[in-house]
Image (cartoon, rainbow, N blue to C red):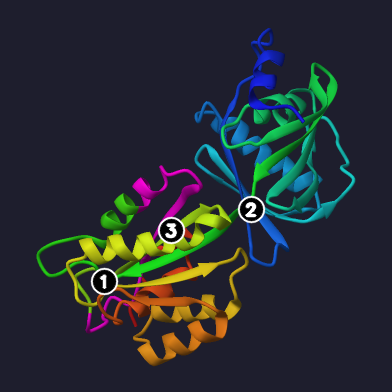
Amino acid sequence: MLSHDDILKRTSDKPWVSPFEKIIGVSSPDENLIQVYEYHARNACYGAAAWAVYHYKQTSELVVAANRDGVRDIFTLKLGKCKLNLRPSYSSAGIEAVDVIDDEIHITYTGLAGGGVGTSLCRALANKVNGVIIHAEGGGDKLGSATLILPKMLKLQVGVDDTDKAGSGATWSLANEIAYHLGKQDGIEYLNHTLIQLYPKAPERTTNCVATVLTFGVRPAKLSYLKKELYRQFKALTLSDHTALAFWSGIELHDELVKFSSLARKEVVTLAKTISLAEKLGIELVDVTGNRGLIGAVAGLGFAEKQDSAVIPAKEE
């Protein structure tokens, strides 16, 4: 296995190698699926991000979902190995193998020509990579292949609602600031921020009736710390007597949660129904200063990765 410094030396005479910004791998508790967040070369290479999403979906049966978020790609992957049918221009690169070994995630990328350089050398230089096994460097018309070894992180989604009061505060921005600073700590990565428009006519609301969900990658040893710190900071900084959090670890959302979230965008849902669903699905509920915010906190989770559609109000009857 080669380290970051080893790859730097190996690429010092190769001006065409453009390092990825960082690559984060997160798993679910049952480890049936993982997700990889790839921040593309120099955090500016939108074209390569779009290229990878297209080709990886074409070539690999391990790719369950692939989405581009600006210069970042998010791949949902199942564990296993597969044979890639690589063809220049049409299906030029893909993911050949995915495994979780102890506290690490192993992903084997293979590609032709420039796609091969990206799979081997460019990704190998990314921050947050433990190491890499280079099978073939690629370049020109050659095949490139490498196994990236990432620290295993757990995916934690955190619904939060009701931190403001009439005339002051904003849940979305308070949540963003707390998450941003926590994400600077070793072993914690702040991955996503989502706003969810809930039922605009709910009687108990501030003006816009919007909840927030934060998504983190966290090393297993720091999971408890992250939850406690989120509670502590929201407790210290909220302006409301009804602030609550909902914690969920996983990758595949349960259909019942998605249906509940959709319902909460169209009509009033009860606290009792919220608590019952959370108990059934293993969502951890935390009263910070009260329990009214639990409804929005849980409802937000079903739209945590649908940023564009989550902000659209439901049509008025």
Query: Is 244 rendered above or below residue 105?
Result: below
**Residue 270 visible here:** no
- Under circle 1, the secondary element is loop
> Any magenta on residue 198?
yes
Q: Which mark is residue 226?
A: 3
192 or 94: nearer the viewer = 192
Query: Is 165 rendered above or below residue 83?
Result: below
Q: Taking 307 as reference, is 14 left or right?
A: right
- Under circle 3, the secondary element is helix
Task: Give the spatial CA distance, label 3 vs label 1.
Answer: 20 Å
Q: Which mark is residue 35?
A: 2
Mark 2 surroundings: few (<14), some (14-19) or many (≥20) residues within 10 A: many
Which residue is situated farthest in the top direction here?
13
Mark 1 surroundings: few (<14), some (14-19) or many (≥20) residues within 10 A: many
**Residue at (38%, 49%) from the top-left corner?**
182
Question: Is the residue under label 2 in contact with that under label 1 (CB below 8 Å)?
Answer: no
Which residue is situated farthest in the bottom direction here?
272
Q: Taking 221 as reference, is 60 left or right?
A: right
Location of the C terminus (image quadrant): bottom left
Q: Which residue is mark 1?
A: 162
Name the amino acid, label 2: Gln
Task: Give the spatial CA distance, label 1 vs label 2.
Answer: 30 Å
Location of the N terminus (image quadrant): top right
Q: Which residues are magenta?
A: 179-204
